Image (tube, rainbow, N blue to C red):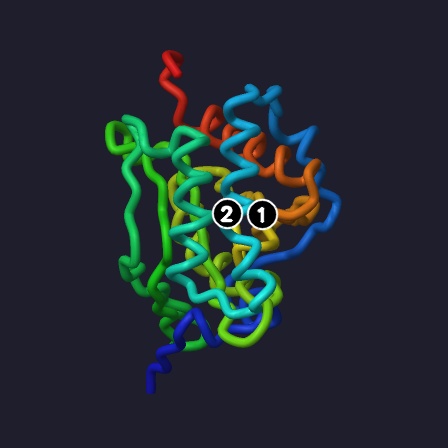
């Protein structure tokens, strides 16, 4: 009898076993991405994003919608993800992943996916927002779900980037195809520390330029 699992309910151990993933923790942002200086205007925009979100951090009650509206979407706009040839997909179900060895299917619904609408086989960028209903949820809680979503991307590309966030903390992940597939955890960034805040946008811009730039942005 076939079993259907929801990606939201998987643990890292489940992902390692079912999807043949292996974790590496030696990721370095500066060795994987080209981080460029930010303009004064971009830095001021970042301060506004942080200041707008701080009251919600203090209250400890950030819904998924608030996190997206006040942090994720403004950051994506600043990093260039609203411009062609990028197309954002939001709240769409993923194709079921069939695990033949265990007669199991894994389903789910991703939060945000950035794709190149001109070249569908171009690298994708998956973003998972973890809802913090009571206090701040650990972004690691979203890693199994995020890895499950990136898994299908490895069918037609060698690597893909992902981001798990609760609005305060940002965990970037680089996933590489292989047997086993490898996911590398980048240094954790947060919205409050000034250096982290700047680096957060630098990383998003670098992923944009690496995967989606047309040369005129």
- Relative to 92, is 31 on the left or the right? right
Query: Which quadrant: the C terminus?
Result: top left
> Which element type, helix, strand or loop, lies under badge 2?
strand
Image point (57%, 54%), residue name: 54
Residue 106 location in percent, x, y? 38, 70
* Labelled pair 2, 1 in contact (Cβ < 8 Å): yes
Residue topped by disc 1? 173
Residue 119's place in the image compared with 66, above or below, is above
Residue 179 location in percent, x, y? 57, 51
- Relative to 133, is 91 on the left or the right? left
Image point (65%, 48%), residue name: 192
Q: Nearer the viewer, residue 122 or 112?
A: 112
Counting other residues with Cα less than 10 Å from the Cα at mark 1, is it few (<14), some (14-19), or many (20 or more)?
Answer: many
- Of the image marks 2 and 1, the number of the one nearer the N terminus: 2
Residue 19 location in percent, x, y? 51, 62
Image point (42%, 57%), residue name: 149
Residue 146 location in percent, x, y? 48, 58
Residue topped by disc 2? 162
Counting other residues with Cα less than 10 Å from the Cα at mark 2, is it few (<14), some (14-19), or many (20 or more)?
Answer: many
Residue at the far bottom in the pictured view: 1
> Which element type, helix, strand or loop, lies under badge 1?
strand
Image point (31%, 59%), residue name: 94
Query: Which quadrant: the N terminus?
Result: bottom left
């Amino acid at each position: 009898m076939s079993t259907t699992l929801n990606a939201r309910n998987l643990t890292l151990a489940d992902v390692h076993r079912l999807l043949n993933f292996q974790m590496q923790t030696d990721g370095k942002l500066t060795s994987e991405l080209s981080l460029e200086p930010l303009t004064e205007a971009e830095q001021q925009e970042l301060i506004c994003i942080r200041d707008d979100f701080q009251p919600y951090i203090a209250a400890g009650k950030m819904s998924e919608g608030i996190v997206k509206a006040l942090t994720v979407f403004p950051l994506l706009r600043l990093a260039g993800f609203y411009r062609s040839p990028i197309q954002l997909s939001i709240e769409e179900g993923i194709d079921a992943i069939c695990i033949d060895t265990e007669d199991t299917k894994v389903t789910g619904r991703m939060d945000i996916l950035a794709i190149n609408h001109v070249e569908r086989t171009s690298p994708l960028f998956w973003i998972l927002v973890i809802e913090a209903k009571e206090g701040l949820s650990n972004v690691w809680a979203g890693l199994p779900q995020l890895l499950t979503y990136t898994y299908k991307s490895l069918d037609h590309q060698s690597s893909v980037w992902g981001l798990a966030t609760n609005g305060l903390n940002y965990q970037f992940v680089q996933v590489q195809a292989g047997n086993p597939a490898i996911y590398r955890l980048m240094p954790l960034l947060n919205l409050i520390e000034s250096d982290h805040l700047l680096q957060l946008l630098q990383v998003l811009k670098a992923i944009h330029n690496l995967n989606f730039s047309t040369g005129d942005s």
